[in-house]
Image (tube, rainbow, N blue to C red):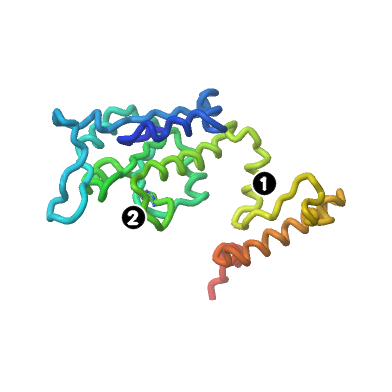
């Protein structure tokens, strides 16, 4: 899969793309990430990427030409989507990531300052996405979140496909608590059932713990799951 990231801070991504599973997947050519500094496509000799907003107001707005020109310089693949990272976008989730992982190409625009000239959205953006209800200094952190979430769903990237099928099996619930050795630490013992070797009982315990955890921390998720499972009403 091809990722094209438009940013004025390409250095921001360098270490993240070199380490861990993302770095390995890039080395193994399971995915390719191209960083495009859209300042290079500015049209004036000072390489200006921002300007004051029409109508006044605080802050600066990203000019349209550098972004549109950069997008036009990128060779488009068959199944491709251009996404603007912005706090006003649709809230990102795992379901959206799964859809994106089916594409050949994701073009990610990292916004900055007070926003992006609206004509960029009209001309080149397919979807606007937010990673949460808070405001970052720019879209770079959000692009990295999206990149990592989508990349690990590409076959062969995670390296442990069992983890993925486990995640989708437990879809909608928070994870149950995990333990490793030693069996006792400072008086705290690992739950007996996990040492029993009884896989059926272990599975049941983990299921009930996941529900308990979700009920306590994310009751909204549990409600959503219950609504999804309700059979559709018969027409009267
Ligand atoms: N840019 C600034 N804040 C953001 C957010 N919450 N999500 C995506 N892009 C952003």
| SS type, badge 2 | strand
Q: Is residue 72 visible?
A: yes
Residue 217, by quadrant, is: bottom right
> Alpha-carbon distance for marks 2 and 1?
32 Å
- Percent from the top left, x then y, of residue 236? 54, 76
Q: Residues within 10 Å of mark 1 (few under 14, many from 20)?
A: few
The residue at which mark 2 appears reads as: 88
Q: Residue at x 51, y 50 (%)?
A: 95
Q: Residue at x 41, y 41 (%)?
A: 143
- Percent from the top left, x then y, of residue 112? 29, 44
Is the shortest distance between ligand 1 and the CB of mark 2 under 8 Å?
A: no
Of badges 2 and 1, the one in the foreground is: 2
- Percent from the top left, x then y, of residue 165? 65, 44
Between 33 and 47, the one lying in front of the other is 47
Between 131 and 192, the one lying in front of the other is 192
* Above/below status of 155 relative to 212: above
Q: Earlier in the sequence, mark 2 or mark 1?
A: 2
């Amino acid at each position: 899969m091809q990722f094209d990231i438009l940013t004025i801070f390409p250095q921001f991504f360098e270490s993240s793309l070199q380490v861990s599973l993302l770095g390995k997947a890039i080395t193994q050519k399971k995915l390719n990430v191209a960083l495009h500094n859209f300042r290079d496509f500015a049209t004036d000799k000072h390489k200006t990427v921002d300007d004051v907003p029409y109508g006044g107001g605080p802050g600066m707005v990203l000019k349209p030409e550098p972004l549109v020109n950069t997008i036009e310089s990128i060779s488009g693949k068959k199944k491709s989507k251009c996404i603007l990272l912005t706090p006003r976008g649709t809230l990102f989730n795992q379901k959206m990531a799964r859809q994106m992982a089916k594409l050949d190409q994701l073009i990610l625009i990292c916004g900055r300052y007070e926003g992006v000239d609206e004509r960029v959205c009209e001309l080149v953006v397919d979807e606007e996405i937010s990673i949460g209800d808070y405001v970052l200094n720019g879209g770079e952190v959000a692009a990295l979140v999206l990149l990592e979430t989508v990349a690990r769903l590409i076959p062969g990237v995670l390296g442990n496909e069992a983890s993925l099928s486990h995640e989708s099996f437990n879809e909608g619930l928070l994870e149950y608590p995990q333990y490793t050795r030693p069996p006792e630490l400072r008086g705290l013992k690992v739950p007996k059932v996990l040492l029993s070797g009884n896989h059926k009982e272990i599975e049941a315990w983990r299921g009930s713990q996941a529900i308990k955890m979700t009920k306590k921390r994310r009751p909204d998720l549990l409600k959503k799951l219950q609504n999804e499972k309700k059979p559709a009403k018969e027409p009267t």
